[in-house]
Amino acid sequence: MEKYYDMPKGCRYMSEDTDLLPYLRQFNKFILNKTVTGCGGTSLFLNSSIDVVIISPRLQALKDKHEQHPDTFFFHSHYTSNGKVAEDIKRLMSELNSYISYCGSTPFTDRKSAKILVTLDSCEKVIDVLEKCGVIDRFLFVVDEFQCLMGDATFKGTTDVNFLIRLDNEAKDICYLSATPIPDMYLDFVPQFNGLPYIKLEWDPDVLEEPNVREIQMKKDESAEKICSRLIKDFRANGYFARKVVNGQVVYSTEACIFLNEVRSIINIIVKNNLKPDEVTVLCSEGKVSGLPKGFKTGGLCTDRDNPCNKTFTFCTKASFEGVDFYSTNAMTFVFINAGKEWQTLDIMLDIPQILGRQRLDINPFRHDAIIYYKTKPDCMTKAEFEAQQKAMELETERFINDFNSAPDSMKERLVKLVRDRAEDKMFVDDYVDVLQMNGRQTLGINTLVQVAKWNQWRQRTHYYSHSCKLTTSIQSAITMNVKPQKVKDFETWYYSAKGNDRLKGYSDFRYTYPCFDSFILQNPFIDIRYHSWFNMLGYNELVRLNFDLQKVEQEYDYYCNHEPIIQKCRETFTVGNFYTKPKVKSILQQIYDSLGLVGKKAKAAELERYMNVKERMITDDEGNRKEGYLILP
């Protein structure tokens, strides 16, 4: 049941539309597709007057929200050992109970609404407290970035599916929120999503900005670590990661957000390039902290949008970036995709738009720019082989569950324990049987979330990672907003694969033919910034005369760049009304060139005509000798 909601013209953030929240409140359980990231989805609910539980699969996102909204209740234990965690959870539940009692209106007070932040893993404890207080129906549960449920299912499917079951059974009002929801083809297959109203926000095209994304296929001997080392080396040499022209001014990116899928790669990059803790921010799961070099820690991302202060390098893993806000005035984004390993395979349709939407500040001219480095790998399993495998798993699942349902209670307990105690690498290999929590009791059932995730994972690898053309087309399909003119897109695609003189010629032809698209071209950081200067200074006709030869063009441009300083020096040196012989003119010009640092530039007397108003004359000196020279005119 898909519904479209038109956001007001000129509206950039969901909270700017005062009619949106009342509209959403008419639904009890629904899916909300924001369609764009960074539009203030969670902020809409956190700043509202309703009681809300924000549930996120990503701890870092909740930490950031709590810093921005310190009056929220953050249900999270900082301990890692089981004994201390259990004790701390009891403390948190007690404090949450007090917090709920304090919030809300009474006949004698008008207190604020309750805002609770909790991870998916700890949500059941919050539900327990709300039920005990008898206020669970007062709350709207917002499952933020709910597309992560499918992405995480292959390694924490039991936790995720039981979260969905418990929440669906206990909560009256649920909003499944995302800018990249689980694809329609899978939604109805998961019982908790089946048949839910699907609300899609339609935004004014004038407020949307389409990303500038360049896809680069890594060579066989290249790796994310090697490329990052090159990026770091170039930054240290140049002082910037990228540059482009905005409103006539050259702007520079001096910060980099680098997305990798393996903490080991981040560690190697830090060590090999001798990076220091004050240069690096690492965002990864808390379980990987111990592997970082001495002095490094996870987190510490700047959350002050008004006065952002970031380290040069921010490394992020797949398990940490969803829902996290990056506040930077100039950060550039780099993404690495490696199809060689299962856990390094991004979900193009879900993950790429999320990554590209992390930069939140409008003042960052590079917020929509990214380079995606990728490797493809043909999938070894054909469609027929995969479908046969899945059919066998489905039949085994059905047989297992039928045997369980017909077994006596004593045997059911043993079967539940058998499945529960399976080794991690044996889960979901032959079947999709899992231990589900139903009505407070453990039973066996099919984990549809994992089943859907397996199908999606195979589809990703087969359709997107088998060939570079398919992958790049899929990336463009995932991020396109139809804001950038098609002619510009076509030119950029051509430009990225063109070479040398052909590239400069195509660039010049395009700008000469379509001057209306200059703003798009100048703000693309992947176009050689020298081309802009050459075209603007020399002009199209001069570039044609030079046959777009890079060496000749650069020499001519260097000459033009020094034209004005030479003119000024000539005016200071040559006197109007005086006559200078050609040897004298040549000597003076050479002195001027040398004083301006024009190393290797040899002076010719005739060049004076380029810099001053002169008249070539022949005169006779006092000794009767005829001499050629120039008369300096006003």
Image (cartoon, rainbow, N blue to C red):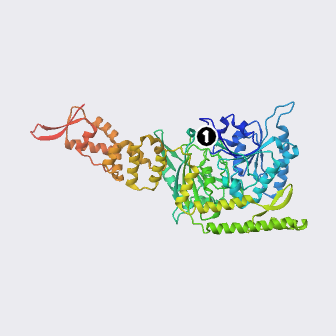
Residue 103 visible at all: yes
In the displayed structure image, the side of residue 507 where residue 181 appears, left or right: right
Name the outermost residue toward the front: 1
Q: In this view, does 139 lie above or below 165?
A: above
Q: Where is residue 184 in the image (x, y as percent from the top left)?
A: 67, 52
Residue 289 visible at all: no
Q: Position of residue 474 (x, y in %)?
A: 56, 55
Q: Where is residue 244 in the image (x, y as percent from the top left)?
A: 48, 45
Which residue is at 84% across, 55% downward? Answer: 86
Residue in the foreground of this view, choosing between 95 and 583: 95
Which quadrant of the structure image shows residue 616?
top left
Residue in the foreground of this view, choosing between 568 and 167: 167
Q: Is residue 225 above or below residue 478?
A: below
Q: Is residue 44 above or below residue 467?
A: above
Q: How many marks?
A: 1
Q: Mark 1 points at which residue?
A: 203
Q: Position of residue 384 (x, y in %)?
A: 63, 68
In the displayed structure image, the side of residue 200 where residue 102 appears, left or right: right
Which residue is at 66% across, 39% downward? Answer: 14
Residue in the foreground of this view, choosing between 469 and 566: 469
The secondary element bearing badge 1 is classed as loop
> Within 10 angstroms of label 1, few (less than 14), some, or many (20 or more) residues?
many
In the displayed structure image, the side of residue 55 where residue 237 appears, left or right: left
Question: Quadrant of the image for the C terminus?
Answer: top left
In the displayed structure image, the side of residue 619 where residue 446 appears, left or right: right
Amino acid type at mark 1 = Trp
Which quadrant of the structure image shows residue 165?
bottom right
